[in-house]
Amino acid sequence: MPKKRPSRRKPAKPSKAMRVLAWVASLFLAGGFVYLMFEAFSLDVFSTIQLSVLGAFLLLLLVVIVWGLFRRRTKTWAKSLLVILSVALGSVSVLGGWYIQQTADFFSIIGTRHTANHSGKDGDDSDSQTNAILDDAAGLGEKMAVTVTTYSTKGYDLKDPASLSGKRIGTVPTLDEEGTKAALAQLESKGMKDAEILEFADQYQLVDALYADNVVAVVLPEQFHSSLLDAANDYNRYGALTTLTNTVDQYLYYEDIPEDMKNEADPVADITQDPFVVMISGSDNYGTLMSKSRTDVNMLAVVNPKTHEVLLVSLPRDSYMPFSCRKNETACGYAAGQYDKLTHSGIYGIGTTESTIEDFLNIEINYTVQVNFSSLINVVDAVGGIDITVEPGLEVERFYANGTEGVHEGVNHLDGERALAFARERHAYLDGDNQRIRNQQQVMKALMRSVMSPSMLVNYPKVLTALSTAFTTNMPSSQIRDLIRLEVSSFPSWNIQSYALTGASDTQMSAALGAAASVTLVYEEDVNTAHSLIEDVLEGRVPQIPAESEDSEDSKHVLNQTNQTNQTEPPIDPILPPDYGNENGGVYVDPSQTPSYTYPVQEEPIDPGTTEVPIEPAPADPGTGEGGEGAFNEIPSGDQ
């Protein structure tokens, strides 16, 4: 008699609790996937193939997990793991979708018409929704970000608006009444309660009160930060505000760029195929990016999207050359054709800097990007700081630029303030401005490494917020998206090379100062080389950087932090204007070899918007209300 087969035991019916968990986990996972796909599609930077592959993968993953959750033969422990996996994947999808949404908001900042309302938020939500996302005629080419910052001295360790509750807050309503009110409203919306608001007459008294502990925090419209920097001297600490304080909060709004500051792009037809040149201008001020100020950084990025070649060309800030006003005669005025330091071109607007470099190198610049001190501080702090490596002999005990702690040999982790000081330092080095250019390039590379590090998963929202006020550009937002679409669609391997022009130190007449100033006479050979290298990239050839441009051991030495002079023999053939401000008739003479020579004191450039020339600096502290602007005399316009 055949044996009777044992009956298969039916799988146990899952408990009601497990069924509920399975449904909740499945719906959460599906919702996360849909949200991620919606935001990825809305961003409009991913290709159709990429979105299709992502969508198919997520759908397949969803089907497999849901099948496992509701399959009766799946063991209880396996279902529990699938529930946990569903919640984890759903959470990652929601986080990814939110990051993409933050990126889209960033694009809307550079691509939509923002109105300068003061509701305590960045623009009006309904207005942002009704305007086109890709408004090429607007964005950072027509709007400038205006920031109102709340600072608190580091000793109080107040780092968020709620910590200001019940404290005394200083303001200057007359500087930016609507912006100040909106900044206070934003502080209250973020948790500040029952604060005592004190009003002061000007920014100097405001900062004096902060340093004297009469208030624990101040609300400062950043467009007036540069005046603090200009007034800084041995008797006050106006130039060290960001060094001595924490940023508690920032309120942001947008205004139209003044006509004398506008600078139209010369765009290429297809930015993903046509080579182009971007001028990166770093202004030596804080706060509003579009304020006219000297340029500390003058760098060209020459990009060929087809060959994936990128060439960075740096010019010394004190390069001596004739100014060109082709881009904006309204801003440039009488400076056309005048010889001066390149750094002074910024006080006549970024268009003047652009056309001056174009004429000097005989090239065409398509786009400009402008950053300033606040830009670097905010972005570096947002990524959690950067690591830079200091070679032996290049240590600095204390930075001259803002008095912060210097750097030691080896790896140094720098916050925003120290990174700024490192990028600005030149007085400590024998090679002066040339070493500063190397430092700036190292800061840029370190910043790029930080942006691509895993810590960006945590810092990404802060970095986007910092970037939204970090730069201004006349590149249309559609082309910015095209570049990003090129990057994420093919992930090209870019070959990045750099070249820096150099020159000899001399003393020449500065048109902006109306007096002699220390300048850099750029070598003609370097100018010709830079032009050739730029043409190589534009024509699709690989640029061959000459060996002479590499750092030499002789240049890697640091001055004792006193007024020492580099006694090395100057190379020949610096570019000299014919008989312009040179008593030697255009023949180069190294001033360091002249025993009786004394370097002139650098004064502030004349504001191009006025015909008033300062006769002498004002010794009085602006915060006292005595003295202040100094004596001025009117001069005929023809004498400017």
Image (cartoon, grey):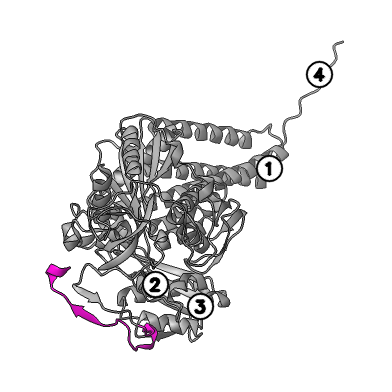
Q: CA–CA distance between discs 4 and 2? A: 93 Å
Q: Is residue 65 above or below residue 6?
A: below
Q: Nearer the viewer, residue 102 or 68?
A: 102
CA neighbours of label 2 inside 10 A, class few (<14), some (14 to 19), many (20+) = some
Q: Is residue 32 above or below residue 639?
A: above
Would you say residue 131 is visible in this rendering? no
Q: Is residue 344 magenta?
A: no
Q: Which of pointers 4 and 3 indicates the residue nearer the eye?
A: 3
Q: Position of residue 6 (x, y in %)?
A: 81, 22
CA neighbours of label 4 inside 10 A, class few (<14), some (14 to 19), many (20+) = few
**Which residue sits furthest top?**
1
The answer to which of marks 4 and 2 sits earlier in the sequence is 4
Q: Position of residue 623 (x, y in %)?
A: 39, 84
Q: Is residue 380 left or right of residue 410?
A: left
Q: Quadrant of the C terminus?
A: bottom left
The answer to which of marks 4 and 3 sits earlier in the sequence is 4
What secondary structure is found at the residue carrying circle 4? loop
Would you say residue 6 is visible in this rendering? yes
Q: Nearer the viewer, residue 269 or 401?
A: 401
Q: Is residue 1 left or right of residue 44?
A: right
CA neighbours of label 3 inside 10 A, class few (<14), some (14 to 19), many (20+) = many
Which numbered tag is attached to residue 164? 3
Disc 1: which residue: 80
Residue under the point 21% across and 69% down:
609
Which numbered tag is attached to residue 229? 2
CA neighbours of label 1 inside 10 A, class few (<14), some (14 to 19), many (20+) = some
